[in-house]
Amino acid sequence: MKLLRQFLIVLIICVIGEVLNKVVHVPLPGSIIGMILLFVCLITGVIKVEMIEEISGFLLDHLAFFFIPSGVGLLAYAGILKKNLVPIMAICFVSTILVMIVTGLTVQLIKGRKAK
């Protein structure tokens, strides 16, 4: 029953994000709006970490399964992907390097603040 309650909390936040997306017409997916809402609720203390801790752990442990539908969906666009393989690989390479640089700089910045 505890896992069901925790899952319902996450699901309700996700549904609220989807509804806000449809009503307000924000150029963000409803799932992203839901994650922002969940983050705000966690920061403000409206939702305590303990209220969703177990279901979050379960979902993170089984995260790989959530990528299977996306991977299968990519097969439908194999022809398009094959034609644009070089630009896609270039974008993946450049964005990976940028993410590594920004992450490294962010960690250094945070560590520098904690050292003071």
Image: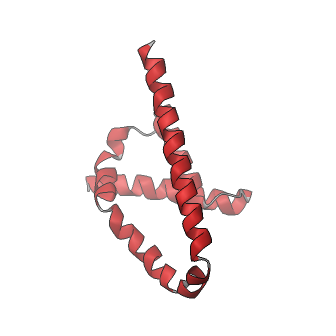
The answer to whether 61 is drawn above or below residue 106 in the figure is below
User: Which residue sits furthest right?
Assistant: 25
Front position in the image: 26 or 20: 26
Front position in the image: 106 or 59: 106
Q: Residue at x 46, y 12 (%)?
A: 116
Would you say 58 lies left or right of 86 here? left
Counting from the top left corner in percent of width and height, residue 48 is at: 39, 37
Front position in the image: 52 or 67: 67
Q: Residue at x 51, y 57 (%)?
A: 14
Q: Residue at x 34, y 65 (%)?
A: 64
Mark yes or no: residue 16 visible: no
Mark yes or no: residue 18 visible: yes
The colouring scheme, among rainbow, by chain, secondary structure or one colour, is secondary structure
Counting from the top left corner in percent of width and height, residue 1 is at: 26, 56
Would you say 116 lies left or right of 52 here? right
Q: Give the total number of marks visible in the rendering.
A: 0
Q: Which quadrant would residue 5 be assigned to in this image?
A: bottom left
Front position in the image: 72 or 82: 82
The answer to whether 108 is drawn above or below residue 83 in the figure is above
Would you say 34 lies left or right of 4 here? right
Counting from the top left corner in percent of width and height, residue 24 is at: 73, 56
The answer to whether 113 is drawn above or below residue 43 in the figure is above
Q: Residue at x 35, y 62 (%)?
A: 63
